[in-house]
Image: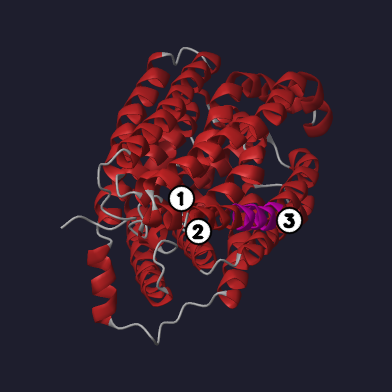
């Protein structure tokens, strides 16, 4: 029996690595396209335009964080494909409802919110916000459906199509009219392409789903809307707070520098972290169903490997930024190099933490992650407001508080897994307690 377990463990590691490689291939291509397009886009569009786009994207992120009530995060967890499909149908229905509600909110309050955040240039595009929200939710659902069916190669292809279409529209439109609309249209077209390709390869079967089956999975996975939604919303508010605070206190240009900084520093996260995270979710759920100790070992191995992989690229970016940024992006983006150096520590630990952040959902301990997100969200926003004397001091407060959150989140996850492995009976992967 021990020999069989060792063979199975070895086989699982090989499958894990192979599937990470499949997604990573797509991530490498996507990152290459983004980096090649970046010098062109930064010479077509001003920092103000990128700042306005980031405010637009941050507003979208706040609504996407609560829709479709995080049921889409559960799609990849069931071993039963039929149950997974029911969750996908439920998520699609909720995404439509939320997009319609957002349209009403934007109609009533959109102008006031944009003026408050010094983003008045988005006024004429505000009704594109609910459309982008719906497309972003559908893209998330489609990608989770691919993960559930273990179509990791298609997942990588979808990522490439998404970014290629987005960058083509952004540059093509900006070549003739370098205004915010070109950047927004790039987002919309990219999401459309990603959704279409993903659903073509992993279609959602609506005809095989009944109202009773949807109600059943909604109740079974009720912890996702009741607990996960709160945690994700709290984390999203804390993540997007720098955008809103920079826009409020220092204007769109500072937001543009911040956007470019996070975009470049997040490339390793997009390149490595997303690939590992999606495979970890699927294999972690299977390992957790078999043995808590096996999940603990997978968690620790993944964290250790991510820490080693992330160190070199982020250090390189931070050290070389003052010389490379003006050459690659243009002289008007020099300020972004300083932002990169300030935020390097936070981005490094974020890259290590995010791919394994689904562990609490796997072992049905979402409340621990939610408590950490809410607590550190309050600390992060409070620190930025307190140190809002300059954009630099605000970003230093953000970097330190974000790094502390990522480190404590990883340690807390390890503690919870050790307690479960030591004998505390887990309730099962992502299954709600009665």
Q: Measuring from the top left, give residue 252's x and y in whole percent.
A: 56, 32
- Residue at the spot of label 1: 60
Residue 22 lies in the magenta-colored region: yes
Q: Residues within 10 Å of mark 1 (few under 14, many from 20)?
A: many
Comes first in the chain, label 1 or label 3: 1
370 vs 398, left or right, is left
422 vs 144, left or right, is left
Q: Measuring from the top left, give residue 412's x and y in whole percent.
A: 36, 31
Comes first in the chain, label 1 or label 2: 1
46 vs 347, left or right, is right
Q: Secondary structure at mark 1?
A: helix
Q: Are marks 1 and 2 in contact (CB under 8 Å)?
A: yes
Label the magenta part by its dominant secondary structure: helix
Q: CA distance from mark 1 to mark 3?
A: 22 Å
- Residue at the spot of label 3: 173
Q: Identify the magenta region.
A: 13-24
Q: Are marks 1 and 3 in contact (CB under 8 Å)?
A: no
Comes first in the chain, label 3 or label 2: 2
403 vs 14, left or right, is left
Q: Nearer the viewer, mark 1 or mark 2?
A: 2
Q: Measuring from the top left, give residue 202's x and y in whole percent.
A: 55, 74
* Quarter-of-image position of residue 272: top right
Q: Look at the picture and state if 240 lies above or below 195.
A: above
Q: Nearer the viewer, residue 49 or 79?
A: 79
Q: Residues within 10 Å of mark 3 (few under 14, many from 20)?
A: some
User: Residue 319 bears which disc, if any?
Assistant: none
Q: Residues within 10 Å of mark 2 (few under 14, many from 20)?
A: many
User: Residue 136 bears which disc, if any?
Assistant: 2
Q: CA distance from mark 3 to mark 2?
A: 21 Å
């Amino acid at each position: 029996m021990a020999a069989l377990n060792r063979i199975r463990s070895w086989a699982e590691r090989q499958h894990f690595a192979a599937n990470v490689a499949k997604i990573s291939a797509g991530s490498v291509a996507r990152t290459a396209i983004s980096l090649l397009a970046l010098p062109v886009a930064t010479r077509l569009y001003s920092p103000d335009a990128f700042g306005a786009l980031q405010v637009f994207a941050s507003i979208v992120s706040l609504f996407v964080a609560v829709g479709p009530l995080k049921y889409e995060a559960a799609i990849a967890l069931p071993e039963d494909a039929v149950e997974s499909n029911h969750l996908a149908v439920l998520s699609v229905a909720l995404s439509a409802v939320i997009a319609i509600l957002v349209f009403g909110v934007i109609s009533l309050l959109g102008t006031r919110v944009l003026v408050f955040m010094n983003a008045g240039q988005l006024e004429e595009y505000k009704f594109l916000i609910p459309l982008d929200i719906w497309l972003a939710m559908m893209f998330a659902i489609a990608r989770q459906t691919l993960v559930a069916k273990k179509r990791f190669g298609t997942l990588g292809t979808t990522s490439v199509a998404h970014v290629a279409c987005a960058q083509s529209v952004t540059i093509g439109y900006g070549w003739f009219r370098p205004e915010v609309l070109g950047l927004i249209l790039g987002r919309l077209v990219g999401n459309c392409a990603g959704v279409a390709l993903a659903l073509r390869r992993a279609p959602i079967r609506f005809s095989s789903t009944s109202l009773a089956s949807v109600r059943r999975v909604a109740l079974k996975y009720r912890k996702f809307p009741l607990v996960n939604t709160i945690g994700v919303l709290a984390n999203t508010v804390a993540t997007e707070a720098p955008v809103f605070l920079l826009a409020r206190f220092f204007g769109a240009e500072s937001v543009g520098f911040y956007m470019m900084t996070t975009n470049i520093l997040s490339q390793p996260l997009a390149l490595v972290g997303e690939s590992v995270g999606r495979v970890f979710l699927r294999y972690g759920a299977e390992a957790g169903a078999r043995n808590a100790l096996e999940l603990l070992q997978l968690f620790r191995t993944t964290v250790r490997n991510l820490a080693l992989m992330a160190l070199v690229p982020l250090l390189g970016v931070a050290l070389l930024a003052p010389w490379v940024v003006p050459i690659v992006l243009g002289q008007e983006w020099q300020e972004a190099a300083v932002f990169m150096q300030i935020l390097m520590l936070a981005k490094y630990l974020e890259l290590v933490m995010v791919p394994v952040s689904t562990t609490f959902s796997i072992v049905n301990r979402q409340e621990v992650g939610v408590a950490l997100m809410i607590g550190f969200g309050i600390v992060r926003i409070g620190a930025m407001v307190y140190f809002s004397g300059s954009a630099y001091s605000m970003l230093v407060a953000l970097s330190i508080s974000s790094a502390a959150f990522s480190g404590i989140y990883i340690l807390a996850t390890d503690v919870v897994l050790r307690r479960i492995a030591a004998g505390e009976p887990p309730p099962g992967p992502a299954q709600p307690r009665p």
